[in-house]
């Protein structure tokens, strides 16, 4: 009999349902349902309203009466807080003192209200006028070598702001434009582009109405893109099958009750989502997909005599490259290795392969469970291999759909936030703005961190985000950060990255997306691109949290104007006065994708930017879609060894990235704490640990660097053996900076090598 103390923590209810409404209430109390807050939420993700600041899932043409989810509501309400982090607050607390606060408490201090300058003599932030701040920042930047500076963007800023931010970097003289995508779907931008020529997903919402099966890898819909649950539910109810691969049995992918459907809420049964659910080992997806592929190939062999082929031979012959070599590798791969690396059995994979073969149209879906691995890009290549066998690319109802993170992270890359000069139409920009653009490759997030460590990066501007919490290698990074000459943070709320400063440091508060953005030409609209490449206008209607706030665009323009020499082609004031002019610039730079931008931005459901893969045009080196030959069957970057675990860093249902709303991970049954180490009961016994015991995690990366995290409580959880779970961002000190996807340098926040040490004991 199982030791009752090892009973796994978990949650048996469906996702959605009453629990999602209680989830909102538990963070915001009764206030969340005030008329003003509800009115704001009712405008969320609607044409003419504002686009949610939470995830990037698409906003449909026919929205629900309330087109928001539990977590979208939390993100909006978080921005609407009545608390203010004003000059009085900063007068009361030294920065040293604030460093002792939890991340939760820092953000709870409310919306930033005034531009602030760090005064090292009193270790406090003090108010500064906007012009004075811009002039001082401009003066610093003018003295620095542009190549020693770096302009980070978290993925929330609008297309208009992103376009100007990237333009500013290039006019100033660098391509150092790391962004949150570098920690997220850069694996897609590089890996997917390499094999099919598209850096983004190929599906549109209509495809989800026409697909027969969805193969789902490492994306936690219930917490991270809950509005997508409606799409999944509709698909399942018309007969589409979902096959899920995830080490964690995520409730959101098991069953769902639509909180907007009164009948289902009161008397209905939850909709069962996944037909098959595979608890793959972390990093085991390459092997699992190889297993699926072997079954598909075997089915095709069997079918050859009958005349009805399983493979789409015509597609493979006309549209792909490298099939024969791949076929050879698939045949040579042993089932024993596949079973070992994936943790799944040949027979179980046969069931999934049958669903794949029976389905006319299949969509492959994935998230961070795939992208945040050392061989993440190869895993994406494997998923493409699987899809290509039956021509599931470039036709309706089929394709590949990475689920993106921040609400405009995909769009920022579309309009020029990239360290890779070849991805940006520099010739056009040079001509349009009469300057010589830098042509050398800039720094991505990992390279920016390397530069901060070795002193070659001397200034950091952060357009949103919480860089020092989001990146790996926290210990060394926090120590090196103050060596910079200048740090500037543009933000809505105080966070830890604002408490570690360069010699000169500024904290510049900006408007949130639900707020009115009044400029010389009147209230402004901004635009975003969602996960399915649809572009939407967004207009705030609430009074700003403080009179002193400025829009992100005007702050970028203010710094740029104070930094750059005058240039008649560059009109910061005109652009700030009327963002329609910036949209004209975007249309001029990207005419194919943004035709009639201003006229189309309020198209219900957004306007689709297009994707050549839908017409089976492959913008790759070979001019075809390429089969990938994986170099290894695991996407984890270090070998197995006794005592070494694979740690997956996870998001709870009560956080948005580094912003922690509360201590309830409702859909996993973890309440009241984030200091947990999730572990399977067998491993707890095998390693002579006890449920409830406090332990430390130590980096096991064989590089001699000590990285540790203390005070985690061993918590039995349904996970594959050899796998541990802990929360992001708390666990980030354990990830080595060099532990990243080989092709794209996306930090590998899943499959991190660690070992467990009892608290207090030496390693
Ligand atoms: N509410 C809320 N919404 C969010 C966010 C948030 O923090 N909160 N963050 C936003 C951002 S920026 C992003 S990028 C997305 C992130 O959304 P997701 O892509 O869902 O990212 P994660 O939560 O990190 O983890 C994804 C899943 O991968 C699984 N996994 C871990 N390792 C493996 C593996 O080796 N193989 C497989 N198959 N699965 C694995 C985990 O169990 C988890 O269920 O969500 C966005 N939306
Ligand atoms: N271990 C581990 N590490 C990870 C991940 C993981 O799964 N595991 N995920 C990675 C991923 S996918 C991502 S995207 C990154 C996230 O990295 P970031 O994007 O840098 O971090 P966020 O937590 O989203 O940023 C939150 C802060 O943004 C500011 N903010 C909020 N709204 C606005 C706004 O409208 N404008 C401006 N200017 N500021 C605003 C607030 O000050 C808030 O404190 O983390 C990465 N790090
Ligand atoms: Mo992300």
Image: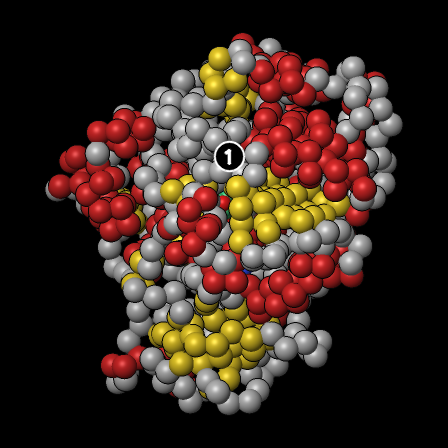
Q: Residue at x 62, y 30 (%)?
A: 131
Q: Residue at x 31, y 72 (%)?
A: 8
Q: Which residue occupies the foreground of this view, 394 or 182?
A: 182
Quick check: can you spot residue 138? yes
Can you give x and y, in whole percent of width and height, for residue 66 in the image?
A: 29, 29
Q: How is the image coloured?
A: secondary structure
Dividing the image into 4 quarters, which one contains the N terminus?
Answer: bottom left
Query: Total number of numbered labels?
Result: 1
Dividing the image into 4 quarters, which one contains the C terminus?
Answer: bottom right
Can you give x and y, in whole percent of width and height, for residue 324 in the image?
A: 75, 49
Can you give x and y, in whole percent of width and height, for residue 396 in the image?
A: 52, 28
**Dot 1, crowdedness within 10 Å: few (<14), some or many (≥20)?**
many
Q: Quadrant of residue 79?
A: top left
- Tag 1 residue: 510
Quick check: can you spot residue 272? no
Question: Is 333 situated left or right of 325 in this image?
Answer: left
Q: Which residue occupies the foreground of this view, 312 or 748?
A: 748
Q: Residue at x 41, y 29 (%)?
A: 544
Q: Which residue occupies the foreground of this view, 537 or 140?
A: 140
Is residue 514 positioned above or below 237 on the image?
above
Question: Is 668 situated left or right of 138 in this image?
Answer: left
Q: Quadrant of residue 679?
A: bottom left
Q: Residue at x 79, y 47 (%)?
A: 148
Secondary structure state at the residue bearing disc 1: loop
Q: Quadrant of residue 259?
A: top left
Question: Is 15 situated left or right of 115 in this image?
Answer: left
Ligand 2 contact, mark 1 (Cβ < 8 Å): yes
Can you give x and y, in whole percent of width and height, for residue 540 in the image?
A: 42, 24
């Amino acid at each position: 009999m199982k030791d009752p103390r090892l009973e796994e923590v978990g949650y048996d209810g469906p996702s959605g349902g009453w629990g999602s409404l209680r989830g909102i209430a538990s963070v915001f109390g009764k206030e969340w349902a005030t008329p003003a807050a509800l009115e704001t939420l009712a405008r969320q993700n609607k044409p003419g309203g504002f686009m949610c600041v939470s995830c990037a899932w698409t906003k449909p043409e026919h929205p629900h009466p309330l087109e928001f989810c539990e977590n979208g509501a939390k993100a909006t309400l978080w921005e609407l807080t009545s608390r203010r982090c004003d000059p009085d607050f900063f007068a009361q607390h030294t920065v040293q003192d604030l460093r002792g606060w939890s991340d939760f408490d820092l953000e709870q201090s409310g919306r930033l209200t005034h531009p602030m300058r760090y005064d090292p003599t009193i270790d406090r932030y003090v108010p500064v006028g906007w012009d004075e701040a811009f002039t001082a920042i401009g003066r610093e930047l003018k003295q620095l070598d542009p190549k020693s500076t770096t302009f980070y963007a978290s993925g929330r800023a609008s297309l208009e702001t992103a376009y100007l931010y990237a333009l500013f970097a290039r006019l100033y003289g660098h391509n150092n434009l790391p962004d949150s995508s570098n920690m997220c779907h850069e694996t897609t931008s590089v890996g997917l582009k390499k094999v099919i020529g598209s850096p983004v997903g190929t599906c549109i919402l209509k495809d989800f109405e026409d697909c027969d099966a969805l193969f789902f890898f490492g994306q936690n819909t219930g917490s991270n893109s809950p509005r997508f649950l409606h799409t999944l539910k509709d698909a399942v109810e018309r007969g589409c099958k979902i096959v899920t691969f995830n080490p964690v049995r995520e409730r959101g992918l098991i069953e769902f009750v639509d909180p907007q459907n009164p009948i289902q809420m009161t008397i209905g049964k939850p909709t069962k989502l996944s037909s098959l659910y595979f608890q793959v080992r972390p990093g085991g997806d390459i092997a699992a997909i190889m297993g699926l592929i072997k079954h598909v190939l075997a089915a095709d062999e069997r079918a050859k005599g009958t005349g009805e082929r399983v493979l789409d031979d015509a597609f493979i012959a006309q549209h792909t490259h490298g099939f024969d070599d791949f076929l050879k590798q698939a045949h040579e791969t042993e089932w024993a290795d596949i079973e070992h690396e994936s943790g799944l059995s040949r027979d179980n994979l046969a069931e999934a392969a049958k669903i794949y073969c029976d389905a006319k149209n299949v969509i492959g879906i994935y998230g961070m469970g795939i992208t945040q691995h050392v061989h993440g890009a190869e895993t994406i290549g494997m998923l493409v291999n699987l899809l290509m066998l039956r021509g599931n690319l470039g036709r309706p109802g089929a394709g590949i759909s990475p689920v993106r993170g921040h609400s405009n992270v995909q769009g920022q890359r579309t309009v020029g936030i990239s360290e890779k000069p070849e991805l940006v139409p520099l010739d056009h920009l040079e001509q349009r703005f009469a300057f010589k653009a830098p042509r050398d490759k800039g720094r991505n997030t990992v390279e920016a961190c390397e530069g901060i460590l070795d002193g070659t990066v001397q200034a950091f501007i952060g357009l949103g985000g919480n860089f020092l919490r989001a990146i790996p290698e926290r210990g060394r990074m926090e120590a090196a950060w103050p060596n910079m000459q200048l740090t500037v943070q543009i933000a809505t709320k105080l966070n830890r990255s604002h408490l570690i400063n360069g010699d000169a440091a500024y904290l510049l508060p900006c408007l949130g997306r639900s707020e009115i953005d009044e400029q010389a030409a009147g209230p402004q609209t901004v635009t975003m691109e969602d996960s399915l490449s649809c572009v939407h206008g967004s207009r705030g209607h609430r009074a700003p949290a403080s009179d002193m706030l400025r829009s992100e665009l005007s702050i970028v323009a203010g710094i740029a104007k104070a930094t750059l020499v005058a240039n008649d082609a560059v009109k910061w004031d005109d652009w700030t006065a009327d963002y329609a002019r910036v949209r004209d610039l975007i249309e001029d730079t990207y005419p194919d994708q943004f035709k009639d931008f201003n006229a189309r931005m309020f198209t219900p459901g957004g306007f689709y930017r297009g994707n050549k893969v839908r017409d089976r045009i492959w913008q790759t080196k070979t001019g075809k879609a390429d089969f990938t030959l994986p170099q290894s069957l695991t996407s984890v970057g270090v070998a197995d060894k006794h005592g070494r675990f694979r740690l997956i860093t996870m998001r709870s249902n009560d956080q948005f990235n580094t912003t922690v709303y509360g201590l309830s991970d409702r859909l996993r049954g973890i309440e009241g704490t984030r200091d947990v180490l999730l572990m399977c009961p067998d491993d707890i016994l095998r390693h002579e640990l006890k449920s409830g015991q406090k332990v430390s995690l130590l980096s096991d990366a064989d590089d001699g660097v000590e990285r540790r995290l203390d005070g985690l409580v061993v918590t039995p959880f349904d996970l594959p053996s050899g796998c541990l779970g802990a929360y992001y961002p708390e666990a980030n000190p354990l990830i080595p900076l060099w532990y990243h996807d080989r092709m794209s340098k996306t930090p590998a926040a899943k499959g991190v090598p660690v070992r467990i040490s009892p608290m207090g004991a030496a390693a």
